[in-house]
Image: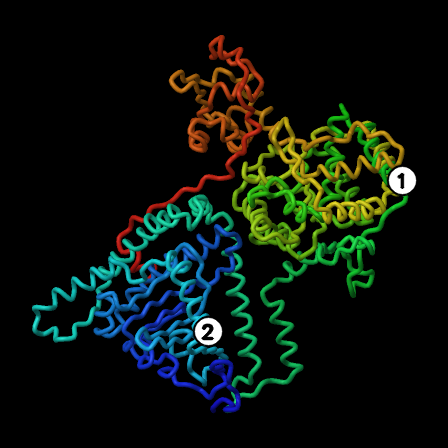
Amino acid sequence: MVNDPSLKKIHIVFNGQETPPMKVSQLFDAHRFNRLTAVTTSVTADFFNQYLSNFIKVEIALRTPAASDAKTADEVVTKEALTHALLAVANKQPAKLFEGLTSGNQANVLNGLFSVEMSPVQALHSHFYLLSNHETHDTRVILGSIDLNNDAFDKDRNQFEEVLVFDNDIRLFQNLSEHFKKDIKPVLRPYFTDNLLKAAQAQLDEGKDDQDAGDNQVVILDNDTTDQIAAADMTDLISHDVQKQMDAKIIPTSTTIAMREVTTDRSQTQEAIARDVKQHDTIYNLQKTSVSPRAAKPKIKSREKIYQQVQQALISGMTPQQRQAEKKYTTFLYDRPMERNLVRNNSGLYVPNDAGTHPIPFGKLATTSQIRDGLRSIDAVMKGYQKFVVDYTADYGKRFFEAILYSFTAPLLWEIRQKASLNPEDGNDVPNFLVLGATAGSGKSTLLRIINQLTWNTDRSLIDFGMIYPTETAQKKAKTVEAIEHYMKQGSSYPVLLDEIEPYFFQQDQYSRHLVVDTMNELINNPHAIAPLIGTTNYDSGFTMLRETARRTYYLQIDKVINDQLKGEANKYIYNVRQTLNTTLFKDFVMRMANLLEDDETPWRDFNTDNGRLDFLSNTRKIFRDYYQMAGMDVPPYFADQICDDFQESSRNSWAKLYVTQADDFKYRESDDSLLFDISKLNTFNGFTADSIEKYRNALPIELCVDGINGKRGKFVEIKAPDFFKWIGERNPYATPEVAHSEPTHSISNSKLPSSAITTEKLKKKGFWARLFG
């Protein structure tokens, strides 16, 4: 069965005029032109041998396939260009192409007449062909989708190709020729490397005296030789080519940092690949089952049957439990900045209408009276905590109010992150995660419900972390985190409200790092609306966080309980207060924040002079201060003027108590002016909890440790004595009088903490390339 001949698969336009199909030999005319420069996706040995052999000079630059996970400039180098180059070499593609050439073409390569190159440090997406003849001065430029392989010219292949040919267009030819020489050529390196060519020449030299070898010797290299070439070429790519391009300032020196952090969000990429494979299998099976299975002349089944199969295919990858887990998140608020129109009172936020059939704008300016009522409702909430929480102070109350401010700002955080970030990594200063580390009976779940009422007019959007999947579910932990990630990435920017997050999520790297660190990296590298997460966790259970998780999380500690004797009265009070809560103030807030986001003069980088942290809620505070002024109310004492740094304070307090109670266990090392502490002593036998070792290890700032991250590892923690005593606020008994009375030159809290340390494994096993890449 042949294709419809009326369909023109290879569309050729010659100097602006559509032409009949041309032969490949006519297009790449080696009689009229004798030189070829090409930037193309691929070249096969068969095509080279058949159509390019008669050129006098051939130079081919191979394009770089686009990588879906390369989002930043540095990632284009590391995840796209360099990774592609290394994989090509590891898979021995250069050697395979060279071996496929005829002996004459191999000789032309060895003599420098034919060359193939690639770009290991810059993604090369260009696509063009330049043909010329220096004697007749004829030129040809070919643009389009074709590559140097026979498939591109197969009219029966069911693919469309565009070919635009420009003959003797001198200006176009010169423009592209200069672009190749000045811009592209400097980033190229030989595809057929010196290591490959030396091995090929050595084989030819050995065969010269062998009468059985014949006149036209062809190079065919054995596996051991190509293994050695691959290993040497990969080494050169990294040690020589990358360094050379940095020295030439073609790529930034920060490339080495990007190389070190190239695996940072690898788990998300691996999941995406796994999902892609699963989706392909589903679609393949759908195609297969859409055709009658046993008919001699297969027919496509009826529309009704195919529809049933499609429905089944869409849910085939999910268990009933997974489908049930997906339905737990039902609150949607979409941020569309491009639709924002302040003149028409459109904040850019949209919600589904009551019937769920279409989106409607969200946000409405409130009257002064309505603003006053909203502030009084929040104040009533705060007075409830003040009245019923044991040992309540105004400073403690700031934590509750900060949570409310964060929740108001949450839907627009991803926009604020872009405004506040000078460098991509600055995005971590605007965390997408708010965690309330709370004692049981502190009112944390009630606070989450109050937040829901203030921003959504219901208290039923809470998700119980432990109940996303039933207890007996296999791989419950991994599936729970998977479900939360799904909730956050549905396109809505309304926060996911998660109650009672279990401690393992923060303590185990495969969960917190995957969700918190990888999600923040995704937000930084590819800004878009990912719902923030506001969650509570039990502080009493020995709560701790990995430092790289803490770096990307706003942590507020709520560690005081509601008076047991007043619980009945407290429950009645808070019930009555919650009847007054509504979204009027929140709807006004989003209008005012949208106005600030549209104003280019709005300052977003407000740093605290004490701890050096970015106050990403500074404009939220400004709006609320304006509210109090408009309402004629005093700013309450629970109003925080800056970010609360509870994780740092909790960490400092833990180590301070440890030192005060067990000072003898901190052994002074005079040679390094450091303290050695045997962290293995923090075990259950000595009265500590089972996870105390990791809790204290995570709480110790890296910059306090001798030799950085290495000072935190192993049995003995080595700490810089002067800095440690400054940090915990205790007198340094080992300091000289001069040092003891001198002023510190800098504050530890002002320095930025490294997020992670990445180790590099050396490949030592013999025959690695043969086993891994074939």
Q: Is residue 457 left or right of residue 324?
A: right
Residue 32 can be seen in this image: yes
Query: Crowding near pointer 2: few (<14 within 10 Å), some, many (20+)?
Result: some
Q: Is residue 654 above or below residue 613?
A: above
* Mark 2 / mark 1, whichever is N-terminal: 2
Question: In this orientation, which residue lies closer to the viewer: 386 or 33?
Answer: 33
The number of numbered badges drawn on the structure is 2
- Which quadrant holds residue 303? bottom right
Q: Position of residue 691 (x, y in %)?
A: 54, 33
- Which quadrant holds residue 593? top right
Q: Position of residue 360 (x, y in %)?
A: 80, 60
Q: Residue at x 63, y 79 (%)?
A: 306
Q: Is residue 374 above or below residue 334?
A: above
Q: Which residue is mark 1?
A: 373
Q: Residue at x 57, y 54 (%)?
A: 474
Q: Is residue 515 left or right of residue 634?
A: left
Between the residue at mark 2 and the residue at mark 1, the CA separation in whole angstroms equals 67 Å
Q: Position of residue 265 (x, y in %)?
A: 51, 50
Residue 41 can be seen in this image: no
Q: Is residue 317 left or right of residue 372?
A: left
Q: Is residue 563 above or below residue 449?
A: above
Q: Residue at x 44, y 66 (%)?
A: 175
Q: Which residue is mark 2?
A: 143
Q: Quadrant of the C terminus?
A: bottom left
Query: What element does badge 2 sit on?
Result: strand
Query: What element does badge 1 sit on?
Result: helix
